[in-house]
Every structure is written in structure tokens, then in C-alpha cells.
Amino acid sequence: MKPIFPATLLLVEDSPGDVRLTQEAFRDVNLNAPRPDLILLDLNLPKMDGREVLARIKEEHENLKTIPTVILTTSEAEADIDKSYRLQANCYLNKPVELEAFEALVKSINDFWLTKVKLPQQRPVG
Amino acid sequence: MKTIGGEGMPIEVLLVEDSPGDVRLTQEAFRDANSSIHLSVATDGVEAMAFLKHTGTHANSPRPDLILLDLNLPRMDGREVLAHIKENENLKTIPTVILTTSDAQSDIVRSYQLQANCYLTKPVQLDAFEALVKSINDFWLTKAKLPRQRQTV
């Protein structure tokens, strides 16, 4: 199902294979626009890890905190799940290892977050 | 259908809703979608907080795995309930989904500012309402990983 408006999505992911897979699954989404409608965030990242990115989005930036941020990670650790919700992740999902399951998950992110959920429409003007 | 709380434990959902018709529809739609859900209902904000804090007649209430929260409620409105949940160290990790008839941008933005996990509008049509409850079940109760902080009584 296609989203009802042209949605902008920011994927924060260090694995090139996972980036490719996600892009292919989301084909029509523009990954380069300035303010995303939805953020998909991996936890284990080089330089600044996902927990810190999440904390900065939700705690330091009044204009970013309303952007729904979905954790998409291989970690199933209870500590990571609890910590992420504590840091105000909007939702926590596990990346499946199998290709088909991965595509199905991306499809369900699209079906739920980009067609059912009402997102804040604070687009920059212009 | 998998369960979240562990073997044989039902999935605990708290619905905070004052409209008896919407309560009935939500109960029926969840019953059809997933038999392992135990749905509790609070009909106003004060009762919702009593349920979550185990006070008064709710001393033995279960900790919800998911909260569905209407915005316009008697006694204490949904925005205030949401703020209380997300400011409480013990409750803040419970995913809280706004389910309301309001599609005002101000309500949407305010709810995300108050850390709602997601915002959904109640469809007017029966079929669409049932489909939405089913998609809440499919996404939040089968795909999403929820924190497992059950309280031991």
C-alpha cells in the first residue's frame, strides 16, 4: 500500500546491505529531504550510536522530538528494548535475518506508520 | 498468536475510553483479532491513573503491555493522562497509542510532544474501525517488541 502523501523517511543504518534492502522495499520514498516524517534508527552505529542519536532527537531538539522514531535493530536484548522506550523511541522492531521477513517488516512499517498513523505535519515552508 | 508476557500470560491492554459504543467495538474487534488479549477498560482519566498506579479498587490491576488512550475524557483528559504516564519512571516505557476522533494538527503535534508512541484517528465506519483495531494488533502486539516489565505482586 502506498502512503497517502509523499512521505520523507530518514534511515540511520551502517550496514550497506540493510540500507539497500530498506531502500528497495521503500522504493518511492525520498531519503534526502531535510525534515523526515519518520526516522528508522539502528542502535549499533559507528561514531555516535543509536541510543545517543535517539536521546538527542527526543531531548535536545524541540522541533525534532515530535518526529516518530522507530528503532530497527538486530538486538533483542531486554535492556536495549527498555532503554529505547525510556529514551522515548516511538516503537522498537527487530530486524529479521531472512530477506523475506525483512521485506515483510518494511512493508508493515509502511502500512502502519505511513498509512494508518497520523504524523505531525511540521514541514518546513517553501 | 504469540504472547508477550511469557508462557500462558495474556497480553494486557488498557483501553481508556468513555464512549460505551467504542468500548464495545474495540472489545469485539480485539476478540476477533487475537484471543490472548486481556482488555481492561477505564472510562475516564482519573480511573486510568488509578488503574496504572494500583490505587483504590484497582489495587490488583495488571500492568498493561499497551495503552490505547482517547483524548477527550471526563474528569481528567487524555492529554493529562499521557503527561502523567510519560513523566512517571515506572510507567513511561509502556507504549501509549492515542486513539481519538480528533484529526486536528494541534492535537497530533501536542500528543507527540507529550511522547505519545503513535497517534491514530477513529474511523467513523464500522469496517474501518475493525480494520484499524486489527492493524493495532498486527503491528503493536505481533511485530513491535514491547518492554517486559511486569510487576511482581
Image: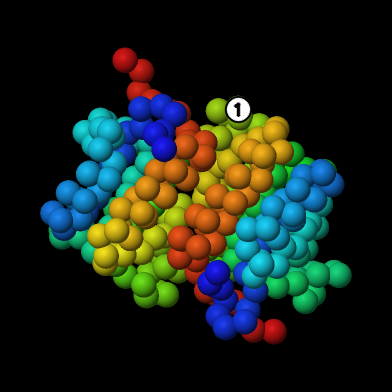
Tell me which chain the residue with mark 1 is part of.
B
Q: Quadrant of residue B128?
A: top right
Amino acid type, residue under disc 1 in the picture: Ala
Front one among A88 and A68 = A68
Question: In the rendered image of this protein, does residue A68 appear above or below residue B101?
Answer: below
The residue at 56%/42% (across/down) is B119
Which quadrant: the C terminus of chain B?
bottom right
Question: In the rendered image of this protein, does residue B44 appear above or below residue A123?
Answer: below
- Which type of secondary structure does the marked residue at label 1 adopt? loop
Left/right of residue A22 with respect to residue B112 in the rendered view: left
The way the protein has been coloured in the rendering is rainbow
Which class describes the residues within 10 Å of circle 1: few (<14), some (14-19), or many (20+)?
Answer: few
x, y (%) of residue B71? 69, 41
The residue at 61%/45% (across/down) is B131
Which quadrant: the N terminus of chain B?
bottom right
What residue does disc 1 label? B104
Q: Is residue A104 visible?
A: yes
x, y (%) of residue B94? 56, 62
x, y (%) of residue A59? 40, 49
Left/right of residue B136 with respect to residue A65 in the rendered view: right
Front one among A111 and B66 = A111
Left/right of residue B103 with respect to residue A106 in the rendered view: right
Q: Is residue A65 visible?
A: no
Front one among B116 and B86 = B116
- Which residue is most to the top? A126
The residue at 57%/76% (across/down) is B5
x, y (%) of residue B47? 80, 57
Front one among B74 and B130 = B130
